[in-house]
Each structure stands twice: as C-alpha cells, then as structure tokens.
Image (cartoon, coloured by chain):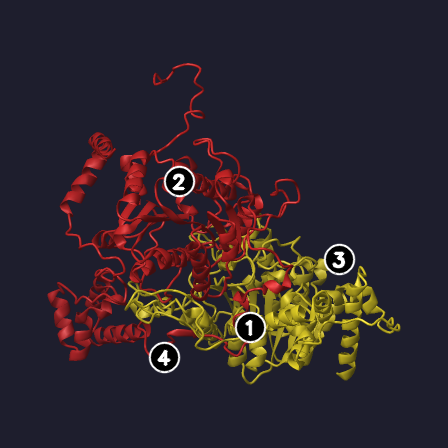
Amino acid sequence: MKLKTLLLATSWAALSSFSVQALQETAEKEEVQSPPSLPGEVHSKIDSATPGLMPVKPLKDVPEDILALLDALPEAKREFVLSGKGASVLKPDLMYELMRKASTQEVEQYVDTMLTVYDQVQYKQGRDTDQITLNTDSENYNTWRVKRPKELDPEREAGPISLGRYLGGGRSGIPTFARSPVALSPEDLVAGEVDVAILGAPLDMGSGWRDAIHGPRAMRMLGRGTGGADVSTMIDPGKVLNIVDYGDAAIDQLSTERSVQEVRDRVREIAETGAIPFIIGGDHSLEYPNVAAIADVYGKGKVGVVHFDAHLDTGRGRVHLLDHGQPIYRLMKEAHVRPEDYIQVGLRAHYSKSYYEWEREIGMHYHTMAEVERRGWDAVMERVLQEATENTEFLYVSFDVDVLDPAFQPGTGTPVSGGLTMREAIPIVRRLCAETNLVGFDIVELAPALDTTYVSTLNANSLMFACLTGVAMHKKGITQKGFISELSSEHGQTDYYGDKK
Amino acid sequence: MKRLHIERKSNILCAAVGAALMLSACASTTKAERTPMPEVAISANTQLLTDQELAFINASDELVLYNLTPEKLAVKLAEKSPQEAKQLVQALMQTSAQRRYQANHTASKATPAEGIEEPLAYLADSDIIPLNPEAGGYNRQRVLQPALFDRYKREPGPFSLKRYLNEEGGIPTFANAPVAIRKADLVAGAVDVAFVGVPLALGSGWRDDKHAPTLLRGMYGLSGYSVEGGIDPTLAMQVADYGNIAVDNMSPELNIEHITQQLTDMLEAGTIPFIVGGDHSIMFSSVSAVAGHFSDTPVSVLHLDAHYRGERDKDHFYSDEQSVANLLEASVIEGENLIQVGLRGASQNKSALMWLRENSVKYHTMAQVERDSWPVVMEQALTELSASAGKTFVSFDMSVVDPAFVSGSGQPVAGGISVRQAMTLVRRACAETEVAGFEMLGVAPFLDLSYNTALSANQIMHACLTGIAMRKSGMDNANYIDPMALSHQ
C-alpha cells in the first residue's frame, strides 16, 4: 500500500512542473525536526512562535542615516527603537521613510509617539484587567449548569428511554439525534450497553457568522440521513450499535471558558462508560474539552486526533485563552495530545507561512488542499489513514463542517471556498471510524440559519452516519482496509470489470 | 402578606384534594377560592417537613426554576408517601443550593498531568474568567493609530471616498457620507451627526448583529429628502461615517470601557453619534457616554424594544438582557427618565413589570397599544420624553418592530409595531426633543433573505436624522409635517 502511494505520487509530480517546483522548494528548506515529545509532556518548542512569548528581535541592518538620526536622541529612546520593541507599533521601513522626511524635533516626536503607543498596547498590571469578574452574589451563579433532580420525574430503571409510541419504538415524532432513544446519565449508558452517545454542545462563540447554537437542534430535527443501511458496506449502524441521544451539555453563551469545563465533564462521563462520545457543536472551541476529556480517560498523549477543517486552529497568544481558533494549541500546550499525533486535513484558509513552519518544527501532520491539488484526494486519504493508526492506539476525529466546500455546506459560520466534496468526505470519515480504534468524534460549526435549505444539515447528518457506519464495521470485526460490499457494488450479472470470481 | 399565606395554604389543600380525588384540573378549584372548601380529610404528606422545607415549597420564586408553583408541587407531594415527599423537597433544595456560587468547591474531575497548568479546568467553580496577560499586544485591538504614523499626511476633516460628483455606488459608507476616522476629523469638519458601527454579537438570540454595520452601509435609505419633514437631512447637516469601534466578541464585559470612551470622543467633538450595533449590551456604554458627557443636563432615554433589558441577579455582570438594570443600578440615569415602548414577549413577566414600576420606569407595553391605540401611546411617550426638557437618547432595538416587517431581528417577538409607526415616533422624538444620540441595535441580517430589514433599519435612522435636521431648521413644533406633503391643493 505504502509503495503504491509513493509511486503514484511520484508519477504525478513528474507530470506537473508546478509540483516539481514545489518539491524543490521543500528540499531546499529541509529543517531539522525537534525530537518527538513523550506522552504527558509538553513539547519543548510549543511556544517558539507564540505571540507575546517569543523574544523581541532587535532591529537588523538599520541604515546609516537612520542610525545618525537616532544617535541624536536620548539614550533610552535610541535603545527603545533599536531593541525592536517599536517595530511592533510602527514597521521599520515606514519609520525610516517617515524619519527621513522629518526634522530632528519631529524624529523625537515619532519615537515619543511609538513609546506611548507601545505602552498602550502592552499588558500593564493595575491598568489592564487580566480577568473577567463574575457576580458571585448572584442566586443564579451556577443555574445554567445545575442538573434537574431526578425525583421530579417518574421513577424509572436506568437505561435508554424509548420515545416511541408504536411497536418497536422510535417513531414518536420527538426529534433526537439519529432517531435514537434518550439517555441522561452514565447509569443509563451502562445499563443500555451503549456504544455511541451523541451529545449536543450548542456553544455559539465562533468568530464568523454565528449560529452554531442551532447545530444540534437542526441535526435532531432533520433526522434524514441518519438511518438505514449504508450502501457502500451494507451495514445498518442502528442495528449493530446501541446509539443514544445524550441530550445537550449546559453552555454559558457569554463565556467559552466556563462552558468548556461542563462539556469536558459530560464527554468524560460518556467515555468512562466505554461508550464513544459523538459531540455535535457548537463552535470548534469544543475540540479542546472533547479531546481533553478523552485524554482524561485514555491517557495524556495516548490519543491521536484527525482534525478536518479549512482552518489550522493553532491560534495562540491571544487575550482569550480559548476560542474556536485555538483548540489545538491549548490541547498540545496542556499535553493532552502530542504534536506528532495531530493530523489536520483540508486546510486552506489564509494562514501565513509561519504557521506551517511552526507545525513542521513541532512535528504536526498537516494535509492542505494544496497537497490534495498536488497528489490527488485518494493519495492524501490513504496517507491520513496510515498516519491515523501509526502512532497511537486510540483516535479522535474532529470534523469542522467548513472543511467541505461551501457548495455543499453554506450553513457554516466560517466558510472557505475550494474545500472537500461530500464524495471525498464520506469515505475518509467512514474508514477512519472503521479502521482505527475510535474513541470520540465531533461535528462542529454547523450554522443552520446560513442555509435556507436543508442541505447543510443533511450533509452533517450524513457525515455522522458515515462515522456510525464505520464504528459498526469495527464492532462487527470488519478489518479489511477500504472494505466495500461486493453485493452492493456489483450486480454480478456480467463480468464487465473482469474480476468476477 | 399574611392573607397571601393563608390563600396559598388553601391552594395547597385544594391541590392535594384534587390529586386525592383524581380531579382533572385543580385550576378550576383554585379560581373559586372563595367558595367553601369541601370537608374532606386529606394528607398533603408534608408532615415530615421541617419549617425550612415548608417555607421552600411555598417559595414561588424558587419553584419557577422547576416550572413549578406551590400548587403544582403540592399535587406532586400528595402523590408520594411522607418519606418520598420529604426526599423530593430535599432534592429540590439541594439543587437550589447548587445554583449559588460555592467557593473552593471543585466539581471537575479533570486530571492535569503533573506540573502542567490547565487554566480552564476548574472555571465553573472559580469566581473569575482568567484572561491571558502574556498575549502578544494585549490591547492592540483597541489602540488607535496616531495620525503621526500615517505614511501620507492629510489635514483633519471628513474626506469623501467618491470619484464622481454624483455617485451612489462605490465604496459603501453610511448614508453615502464622507469618512471621518479620528476625533480630529469630526472637530475639523464640525460634523453634526456621525454613524459608527459596533459589531458586537453576544446577544441572547440569533447572533448576527456583527454584520449589521456592513450591511447597513451597503443599503439605501439613509440619505436624501424626507417627504414628511420636507427636508434633506444629509444636505442640511454635516454627516459622516466614523467607521467601526473595535469589539471583543468573546466577552461583553471587555467592551464597556472602550465603547464608552469612543462615544465620549464623538460627543466631545460636538457630534451626535448614531450607533449601529451590535447587540443591546451596547446600551449600557452608549447611555453612560451620553449621561457622562451631559452631566449638567437631564438625559432621558426613549427605549424602543420588545425587551425590557432589566434582568438582574445574573452570573455575568453585563449582557444584552441587563443593560437597563445596569444603568439604573449604577444610577447612570434615573428610572423616571427612561421611557420604554413596545414591550412584549415572555421575559416581560409580572416581576419584570413590577421591577420597572418600582424603579419608576415609564413603560408602554403592546398590551397598552392594543387597548389605547398607537397614536395615544405615542403621544404619551413623547410627552413623557419632553417633560425633563433635557437631552434625549434613542435606543432602538429591531425587535420592537413586528417580524412581518423585519425578519432580521436577533430576538424577534411577534405582535410588534410597524415600520411606519417606528419612523413616526422616531422622527417626532428627534424633532421635538434635543437628541444627543441614537442607536440601532439587534439587527441580524442573515435572518432576512431580502433587503427588507436593512432598508427598514436605514429608513428608521433616516427618520431620526430628519427630525434632527427639522429641529435645527426650527420645525420642532409637535407633530410638524411638511404642508406641501399633506395636500395637493
């Protein structure tokens, strides 16, 4: 398999001068990679490119005439400019240009202004707050997350609650994920020997268009796409697996920071029962509590993550410790996942070179749409599947629907053109969920109000179904890579393909 | 108070009787509370409850959380044995206790690796939300660019982005107006009115308010002649687009100071700010800026909204639901100087209205409009607004308008006023009182597939612009309408 992929890649590269060029560029920039980190240890280079934590670089190659101008200034001001601190508020080239046109007095005015602005920009204890205070006197401090006492409802045995009125259950009209029965506690999961518990987490703090709050609701209400047999495998996940709707995790819609602990607790309690949590977001900050909870159960650095996304989500050094652009950094910074166990797929948003350089430095595995353009989807898919089983025993899959092309997924808050098709996404999701030891899965950033049709929600449901199919295959012990049903992929009346046995 | 208690007790009895006799609805029995109670010996199963527990089952405010009333709970208790009843009440009380902040209580089972900090792991039990002071350029987002750093220097003053003399398209700006991006531009241009976007989207409904400033810049309806006023406000006055104010869309709390400061800059320049939000949490900053700047003059607020924004006792200090509560609590304005029009919907409940009354807020619900008709309510509101003879601030939330006219409100409530009614009230308020500022909040464009919400929002703002221009031209008498527009003769 590996050899075949390599050959394929080489022949394509040879056909395309662009690709050859790209290969050369890579060869020239060959870097020494840092040693792999140990499970539970923070990678030594984790903050080598974090804004605020990188050393300030002194100005290089300052022109002679500018040096002469600076020499006329008081020592402290001269030092400030040369230290490079000023460069963060006024770019050196522009500063040179402005100073060349300025009088001696004006040069000093420039530096004074730079000092003032630099001071305004920096965090200053006493002047700037480093925390948001909350109202601890409130009777409602925790009301958002307090659980309903079970004594209020009729007593029942632990186990999934069927909502069906008719024979066989399941057809009551109450919208649940994949038309599943409902479970509300770990006891329900254990009693029901639940394989997959689907949890809604409607956190709506994403930075694009916001409507992720309605993602879980939309997927429950549509239902379509989540039942029956999968044509590629002839597997009916609903018959193989015990699937439940685990309700929603409580969310504080004014604070991602507060919400994620609650989500982490809910995801952890699912994983502790041995069930696989499927989390339906909500924005992508959820990847942090989801994967941290999985690491709580399966061990720090023991779980690999495949991150489908148009975005890198490795943002860092921002005022807020977590938002939907920073989950990966936070997970690695807290050693839940090792950088080399992170596999990103479908990247194409407009991130600068430095982001990719840092990912290389710490050993992450990224697969951009540029790689898909160069190698073709099948080759990239095989490589991802291989990487997903190489390093770790367990795998978590985080699926941001914006990895799909907006043609398939207008209903997302952060769309980027040029993404995956559903035909590309379904097989890789199914195969990751079938061919690895999947311990968690999420679908995030579905924003239904941005799609006046049902299409975005249907596609999100279909991707969840693809993973459910994979989990069912895994449970049935289908180990063949890329398994496709012979029955459904061939009518068998003729030997058209010449491979009839 | 005592009487209330007795009544409640009889209700409990009635409820218990209802349950014991399998009556279908106890509500009917409750209504007829003056009819003699049947002589039935029943047990409410509360005999094991302590005084504290008995008090709890009668505490309506607490029971609301469980969607229970003392009556409904009594029915539940009657179905149980005394032991079970006590168990249920204790469970409810324990749950209620968890609502409050508990210092040093850690519910999380997060398992940080040794020596690794997890700043977010125990947050729900912490009394703060930590930020990251190590962030590179902590305040960068809110720091203004000094004019000195401009590569190409220019004189201060509003500048046009149009190439042609008579251009409607091109670079979209509010009201097709020239741009003023610094306080000095407003001062130099003696700008009367400047629009400013505040793309904050932390409201409690659909969150798309952040796109309203952009969408409204690209929409018609904000400039030109007004038939009602007989004046073209954008011609009669110096109008400018002041750009957007930077916001932190991860926290309402972190925006208050900066928005207030930026609006104060505008007021100091002698400019009337027209704020295009943004969610309604902005109201705290905007009214604070206006009341702070005109500290010697009484400031009245005309608040058009389906929502009263007076939620109290929340875990967060600031949000779109709390602006009015925050303003009154901080005594930024007095309740008697706040006139609310258009209230409706479930959050405007009895305790909300009671609180408004206690604070002397002059509220006008849609129930009043239903009974008294719109012109009557509008006149009353305008009379109340002009009573203080000071400055007026208009806080307009798109939810005041019926969703049939504007589906693009982040918190829509059916049964609102029409765009026509909104325009008339706004124009008159701006013509007949001294307006110090206006805000258009709660516009969520993606909820409207048409141009309707954006166009209506602009035309409602245009109505206020018209009013201000009318007043400047001396046409400030009550309900002035241009005679030319009223008759063809």
Sooner in the amino-acid sequence: mark 1 or mark 2: 1
Instruction: Between label 3 and label 2, give the one nearer the viewer.
Output: 2
A296 in relation to A459, above or below: below
Tell me the element at label 2.
Answer: helix
| Residue A229 in view in this figure | yes
Residue A382 image-quadrant placement? top left
Q: Which chain has been coloured red in this picture?
A: A
Q: Mark 3 = which residue?
A: B487
Disc 1 to disc 2, C-alpha distance:
45 Å
Q: Along the horizontal axis of the image, is A139 left or right of A13?
A: right
Distance from Cα at disc 3 to Cα at disc 4 = 62 Å
Q: Where on the picture, by quarter, is residue B123? A: bottom left
Of marks 3 and 4, the one in the foreground:
4
Looking at the rendered structure, the kind of residue marked 2 is His
Residue B296, image x and y in percent? 55, 85
Give me the chain letter of mark 3: B
Report the chain holding disc 2. Answer: A
Mark 3 residue type: Ser
Q: Which mark is residue A127?
A: 4
Residue at label 2?
A474
Tell me, what hue is chain B? Answer: yellow
Amino acid of disc 1: Asn
**Residue on which disc 1 sits:** A140
Q: Nearer the viewer, mark 4 or mark 1?
A: 1
| Disc 1 to disc 3, C-alpha distance | 59 Å
* Residue B164 image position (x, y, % from top left): 44, 52
For the residue pair B439 and A404, the one nearer the viewer reads as A404
Circle 1 residues within 10 Å: few <14, some 14–19, many ≥20: many
Q: Do marks 1 and 3 share a subunit?
A: no
